[in-house]
Amino acid sequence: MTISTCPPPEGGSSAGRTATLIGVSALASLFLAACGGDDNSPPPPPPPPPAAITQVPASAAANDAALESFAFNLPQTDNTEPLTLDLVPTLPTSETESPIATP
């Protein structure tokens, strides 16, 4: 609320001017709120999915723990492609454990 130091015009009161100011402010607020936005606009498109991992990095082949960590941290999806070993010069081997038998 503003307080005016000017005397009210002849025949008018400061209470009437204040009420008019409040009314005009309320109408302006309602108008601005009504123009706030369009609810019929389509939602923004979803972000693109993360890039698929298709190769085992050379750093994952440094040792057994790095390879296990890489494999366990891969995202689990229904459409995962097989990984290639183009970047890996050699896979880690163990001199103390026997190889795992494959069926």
Image (cartoon, rainbow, N blue to C red):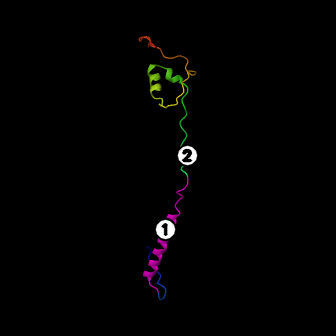
Which residue is at a point 51% across and 65% down the rendered structure image? Answer: 32
Q: Amino acid at mark 1?
A: Leu
Where residue 30 is drawn, which disc sits there? 1
**Residue 38 on image: x %, y %:** 54, 58
Asked if residue 23 is among those painted magenta in the image, a careful observer would answer yes
Question: Residue lying farthest bottom?
Answer: 11
Q: Residue at x 55, y 34 (%)?
A: 51
Height in image: 8 above or below 43?
below
Disc 1 crowd, CA 10 A, few/some/many (<14, 14-19, 20+):
few
- Residue 3 image point, x, y percent: 44, 76
In the image, what residue type sits under mark 2? Pro
Q: Is residue 80 above or below residue 99?
A: below
The part of the chain drawn in magenta is 12-41
Q: Choose between 4 and 40: the one closer to the eye.
A: 40
Q: Is residue 85 left or right of residue 65?
A: right
User: Which residue is drawn at the image coordinates 44% and 84% (left, top)?
Assistant: 13
Q: Residue furthest right?
A: 86
Residue 89 x %, y % = 55, 18
Q: Nearer the viewer, residue 8 or 74?
A: 74
Choose the circle earlier in sequence order: 1 or 2.
1
- Per the image, label 2 sits on a secondary structure element best described as loop
Q: Which secondary structure lies at badge 1?
A: helix
Residue with the mark numbered 2? 45
* Majority SS type along the magenta span: helix
Q: Is residue 37 part of the magenta span, yes or no?
A: yes
The disc label shown at residue 65, or none: none
Q: Position of residue 31 (x, y in %)?
A: 51, 67
Residue appearing at x 44%, y 27% in the figure: 72
Mark 2 crowd level (few <14, some 14–19, many ≥20, 10 Å Cα): few
